[in-house]
Image: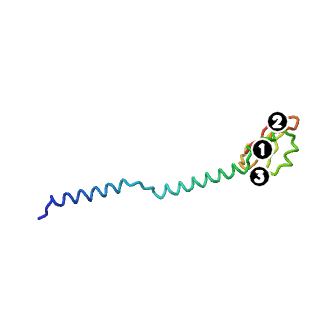
Amino acid sequence: MFNFKKCGLSVTVIAAAFTLQACEPTTPDYFQEVDVIATQAQTTTRTTSQACNSSTLQWMVGQPEGVIAGVELAGPVRVISYNQVVSTEVDRTRTNFYLDTAGRITRVTCG
């Protein structure tokens, strides 16, 4: 016959091993793909936000419009006069220069 007392311990050890293996954290392939996509999106966002780099152009506030032509910029430029109607499309690589009625730069932004 079969001795259950001797097998009981080995069955318990095997069951414990399977239970511990099941507790081991694993990431399904789907989530690994999503993480890669999210990382690529963050990298792209960082790259495009750096292309405008309006934070380094804040020294231009208060300067006349002619200063814009003397500065080398990486992306497209949009000069917005006082009360000018502009589109609402957003281009994170574009640098926007806002002018007052005297033609002086009042704001420098990305978008």
Circle 2 Cα neighbour tier, 10 Å, few/some/many (<14 / 14–19 / ≥20): few
Q: Which residue is mark 3?
A: 75
Q: How many marks?
A: 3
Between 88 and 93, the one lying in front of the other is 93
- Left or right position of 2 against 87: left
Q: Of the two numbered discs 1 and 3 on the same chain, state the one appearing first in sequence.
A: 1
Q: Of the two numbered discs 2 and 3 on the same chain, state the one appearing first in sequence.
A: 3
Position of residue 21 measured from the top left corner of the image (x, y, whole percent): 35, 57
Circle 3 Cα neighbour tier, 10 Å, few/some/many (<14 / 14–19 / ≥20): some
Between 40 and 86, the one lying in front of the other is 40
Q: Amino acid at mark 2?
A: Asn
- Left or right position of 49 against 105: left
Rendered view: 25 above or below 104: below
Q: Which residue is mark 2?
A: 83
Measuring 80% from the left and 37% from the top, which residue is drawn there?
Answer: 106
Q: Which residue is mark 1?
A: 57
Q: Considering the image in quadrants, where does the N terminus appear?
A: bottom left
Measuring 74% from the left and 48% from the top, which residue is drawn there?
Answer: 52
Q: Helix, strand, or loop for circle 2? A: loop
Circle 1 Cα neighbour tier, 10 Å, few/some/many (<14 / 14–19 / ≥20): some
Tell me the distance, in whole angstroms, between the alpha carbons under discs 1 and 3.
Answer: 13 Å
- Left or right position of 1 against 103: left
Q: Considering the image in quadrants, where does the C terminus appear?
A: top right
* Outermost top residue: 101
